[in-house]
Image (cartoon, rainbow, N blue to C red):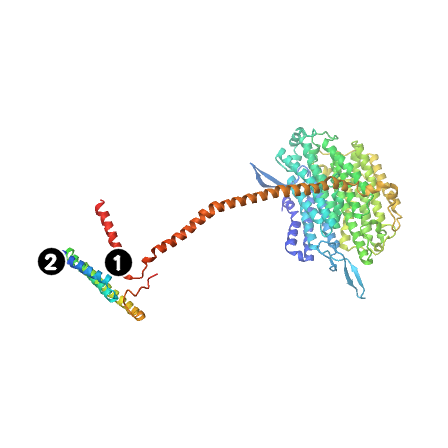
């Protein structure tokens, strides 16, 4: 069996790629995609720990499925917001969306 | 209902009437007087039931009707008040109920009920008359109704409450309460026409003068309470141990015993209330009030209260003396009474105002009573008190009727004369027959006209007592006073009713309405027959036909029953001579006064007449001795020094110092500390805001970096804490 550390290293790499995408990209769509990567990195962790710690129970899988559902909902909401922002301001670049500024 | 409960209820109806009139019915004159007179009738019925029961009970003095009630706790015990009807209160209740009822009824007519409203009448001034036109189109001036009609009936109701309370109570403190309620009503009613400056002055004078006596009386009551621990009559005046103890303890003041000193203090209260010399000055001025008030308060009831109280405390003043001897206090009482009797009667002979004559006569007659108490003849004093209430109320009401008739004439003729001056009257017997006959009866009773009238029997008893116990000075002085009494009474009757009218107003005088004449008739009957209860048993011919009820009944009031003095012809003859002599003299001097003539006595007496007319200048003397110094003190000491300098100075000083303290606090505490703190909070918040403002860029990614960095930093810190600091 593949050792658990491989999975964890893979998940951490995936998370860092996602994080970099979130922090570095200007395009809001790309940021959303980064978030998806981070969530999936967490899912990989969940499944890996489930498989190695308590394979007789179903918890880990259930958590992963719930995370999928939440991620889907979040993306739907996020995309809706960006569409709305795009309609109003003609851009989805986060540099230009600074309405939260004082 | 037991008799005790009934006695409690007697004073209440007039009090209720007072409150109802004042609070509710004062706009309705008819309802107000109905309530007031109705309450007087209720009290009268209650009184008559009680008096009847009292007359019919055996040994009432030993077993009086009593009912007690604990009022308030005083230390371990309760202060007990109560009602008590003993022979003295029964007799007093009898005359009080009759005179009050009669005067209430009389007031309806006197205050012109049923007459139209006056043309120019204003509250606080006597009615000035109204113009009415008859069927022929002629207009007449007629008397108008009193503007403050309801108020009058409310006040006399309150007064009646005070008097009934004073009579039925068995406690000296409650007596004092009734006493003061009457003082207040006297004040209010003397100044009933408060629009007149003279009435205002008179009300204040009456109140202040009686207050002098009342202060001493309150001292006496306080002393008595301290000495005995109770104020119930029964426990003090009917208790030999207490009396003996009070009489044998010396106070060291003028060598008086405690009993003597308390008696003297209480007597000073009576001097004020009963207008005895030297506190007599208020009573003549009190005639400013409406005449029913003069009759009720200042002749029949309130001024009698002083005599009543002094008879009440007689065991105290006489304690320690053998029968027939006088204690120092009794000597003082006898002196004041006798002196006042002669003093006031000399003033009365020079007065022209019909009511002032009666006022001085009242003072003089009350002097007779005090003289009688002073020489130990308290039964005679009580007898004269009751008789005097009847005939003096009658005389006052009669004079009110005369004044009323004269005012009618004055309104009719339009003359500008004083309707109370007897020299403006004359010949009124034909115009006002009912008033004349009743006034004549009252006058004869006052003079002590032999056999028929009540005044003869009561005055005769005082003479007999003075003579029988060898008090020569008292006897002779009182005889002289009685001579003068008969003289000025006849002078009054002659000037008012006999001869020919001296003014047009007197020609057009008019008999008063039935509400006024009915009380006159009732009181006239009482002035005659009431005296028959006190005919001495060894009096020639008449003696014994009617038992001497008075002496047996009232004599029982106290522990020691006084003995009847042995009959002697000398006081009887004296009484006859002074009475008939005075009457004849008065008639001879005044039978033929011409229009505009002066008093014939004025020429004969010269300056003495002026002195008498001015009442020995007592008003001026008191004005100089007390009134002016009081004003001077009030202005220079109380106002200029005390008020302006001391009180104002203290207040201004306090204000100034407070201002300084405030200023200090403002500069050193308020501004730097309180304000500073507030400002500091505001400024600091603002500064912090400026400080953190730049990190609010609005870039989501920057926020996320901050979040990431801080999370990692905190993680590092926690990791360090958890791992390396175990």
Q: B623 above or below B469?
A: below
Left or right position of B714 against B454: left
Q: Is residue B418 left or right of residue B217?
A: right
Rendered image: mark on residue B705: 1
Label 1 lies in what chain?
B
User: Front-most of A52 and B681?
Assistant: B681
Front residue of this view, candidates B507 and B670: B670
Tell me where residue B228 appears, x and y as whole percent.
Answer: 63, 33
Which chain letter matches label 2?
A
Q: Position of residue B7 (x, y in %)?
A: 65, 45
Q: Is residue B371 above or below residue B22?
A: above
Give residue A2's mark: 2
The residue carrying pointer 2 sits among few (fewer than 14), some (14 to 19) or many (20 or more) residues within 10 Å by Cα, namely few
Q: Nearer the viewer, mark 1 or mark 2?
A: 1
- Image quadrant holding the N terminus of chain A, namely bottom left
Q: Position of residue B443 (x, y in %)?
A: 81, 46
> Relative to the observer, which residue lies in front, B30 or B41?
B30
The reply to whether residue B129 is visible in this rendering is yes
Residue B539 shows in this picture:
no
**On screen, residue B615 above or below B108:** above
Secondary structure under the numbered disc 1 in the rendered image: helix
Q: Which mark, residue B546?
A: none
Quarter of the view holding residue B30: bottom right
In x, y percent, where is residue B52? 70, 45
Q: Front-most of A69 and B154?
A: A69
Q: CA distance from mark 1 to mark 2?
A: 35 Å
**Quarter of the image where the C terminus of chain A is located:** bottom left
Circle 2: element type: loop
Q: Quadrant of residue B686?
A: bottom left
Q: Residues within 10 Å of mark 1 (few under 14, many from 20)?
A: some
Marks 1 and 2 close (CB-CB < 8 Å):
no
């Amino acid at each position: 069996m593949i050792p658990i550390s491989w999975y964890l290293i893979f998940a951490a790499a995936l998370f860092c790629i996602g994080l970099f995408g979130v922090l570095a990209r200007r395009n809001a769509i790309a940021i959303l995609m980064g978030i998806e990567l981070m969530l999936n990195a967490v899912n990989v962790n969940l499944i890996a720990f489930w498989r190695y710690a308590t394979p007789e129970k179903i918890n880990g899988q259930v958590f992963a499925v719930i995370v999928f559902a939440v991620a889907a909902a979040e993306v739907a909401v996020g995309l809706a917001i960006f569409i709305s922002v795009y309609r109003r301001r003609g851009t989805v670049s986060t540099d230009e969306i600074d309405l939260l500024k004082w | 209902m037991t008799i005790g409960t009934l006695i409690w209820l007697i004073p209440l109806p007039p009090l209720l009437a007072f409150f109802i009139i004042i609070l509710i019915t004062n706009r309705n004159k008819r309802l107000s007087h109905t309530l007031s007179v109705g309450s007087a009738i209720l009290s009268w019925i209650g009184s008559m039931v009680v008096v009847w029961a009292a007359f019919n009970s055996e040994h009432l003095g030993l077993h009086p009707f009593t009912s007690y009630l604990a009022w308030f706790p005083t230390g371990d015990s309760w202060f007990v008040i109560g009602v008590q009807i003993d022979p003295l209160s029964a007799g007093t209740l009898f005359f009080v109920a009759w005179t009050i009822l009669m005067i209430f009824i009389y007031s309806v007519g006197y205050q012109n009920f049923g007459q139209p409203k006056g043309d120019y009448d204003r509250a606080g001034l006597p009615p000035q008359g109204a113009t009415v036109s008859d069927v022929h189109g002629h207009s007449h001036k007629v008397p108008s109704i009193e503007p403050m009609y309801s108020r009058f009936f409310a006040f006399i109701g309150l007064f009646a409450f005070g008097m009934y309370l004073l009579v039925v109570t068995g406690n000296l403190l409650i007596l004092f309460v009734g006493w003061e309620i009457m003082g207040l009503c006297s004040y209010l009613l003397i100044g009933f026409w408060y629009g007149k400056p003279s009435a205002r002055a008179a009300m204040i004078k009456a109140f202040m003068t009686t207050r002098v006596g009342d202060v001493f009386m309150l001292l006496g009551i306080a002393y008595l309470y301290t000495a005995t621990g109770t104020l119930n009559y029964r426990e003090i005046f009917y208790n030999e141990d207490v009396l003996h103890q009070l009489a044998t303890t010396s106070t060291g003041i003028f060598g008086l015993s405690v009993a003597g000193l308390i008696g003297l203090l209480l007597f000073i209260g009576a001097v004020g209330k009963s207008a005895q010399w030297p506190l007599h000055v208020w009573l003549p001025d009190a005639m400013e009030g409406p005449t029913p008030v003069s009759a009720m308060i200042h002749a029949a009831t309130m001024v009698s209260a002083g005599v009543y109280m002094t008879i009440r405390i007689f065991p105290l003043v006489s304690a320690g003396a053998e029968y027939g001897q006088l204690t120092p206090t009794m000597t003082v009482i006898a002196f004041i009474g006798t002196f006042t009797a002669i003093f006031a009667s000399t003033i009365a002979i020079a007065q022209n105002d019909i009511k002032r004559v009666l006022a001085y006569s009242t003072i003089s007659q009350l002097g007779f009573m005090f003289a009688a108490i002073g020489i130990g003849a308290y039964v005679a004093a009580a007898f004269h008190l009751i008789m005097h209430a009847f005939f003096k109320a009658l005389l006052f009401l009669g004079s009110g009727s005369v004044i009323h008739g004269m005012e009618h004439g004055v309104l009719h003729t339009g003359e500008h004369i004083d309707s109370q001056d007897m020299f403006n009257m004359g010949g009124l017997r034909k115009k006002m027959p009912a008033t004349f006959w009743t006034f004549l009866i009252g006058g004869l009773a006052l003079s002590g006209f032999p056999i028929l009238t009540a005044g003869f029997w009561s005055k005769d008893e005082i003479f007999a007592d003075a003579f029988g116990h060898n008090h020569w000075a008292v006897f002779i002085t009182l005889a002289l006073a009685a001579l003068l009494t008969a003289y000025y009474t006849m002078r009054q009757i002659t000037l008012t009713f006999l001869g020919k009218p001296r003014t047009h107003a007197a020609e057009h005088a008019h008999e008063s309405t039935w509400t006024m004449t009915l009380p006159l008739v009732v009181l006239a009957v009482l002035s005659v027959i009431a005296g028959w209860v006190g005919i001495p048993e060894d009096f020639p011919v008449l003696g014994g036909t009617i038992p001497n009820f008075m002496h047996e009944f009232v004599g029982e009031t106290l522990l020691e029953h006084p003995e009847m003095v042995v009959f002697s012809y000398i006081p009887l003859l004296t009484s006859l001579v002074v009475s008939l002599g005075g009457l004849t003299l008065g008639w001879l001097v005044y039978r033929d006064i011409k229009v505009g003539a002066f008093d014939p006595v004025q020429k004969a007496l010269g300056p003495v007449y002026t002195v008498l007319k001015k009442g020995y200048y007592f008003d001026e003397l008191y004005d100089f001795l007390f009134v002016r110094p009081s004003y001077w003190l009030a202005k220079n000491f109380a106002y200029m020094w005390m008020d302006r300098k001391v009180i104002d100075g203290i207040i201004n000083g306090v204000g100034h110092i407070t201002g300084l303290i405030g200023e200090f606090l403002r500069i050193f505490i308020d501004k730097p500390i309180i304000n500073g703190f507030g400002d500091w909070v505001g400024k600091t918040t603002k500064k912090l805001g400026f400080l953190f403002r730049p990190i609010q860029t609005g870039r989501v990614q920057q926020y996320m970096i901050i979040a990431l960095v801080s999370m990692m930093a905190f993680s590092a810190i926690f990791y360090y804490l958890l791992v390396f600091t175990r």
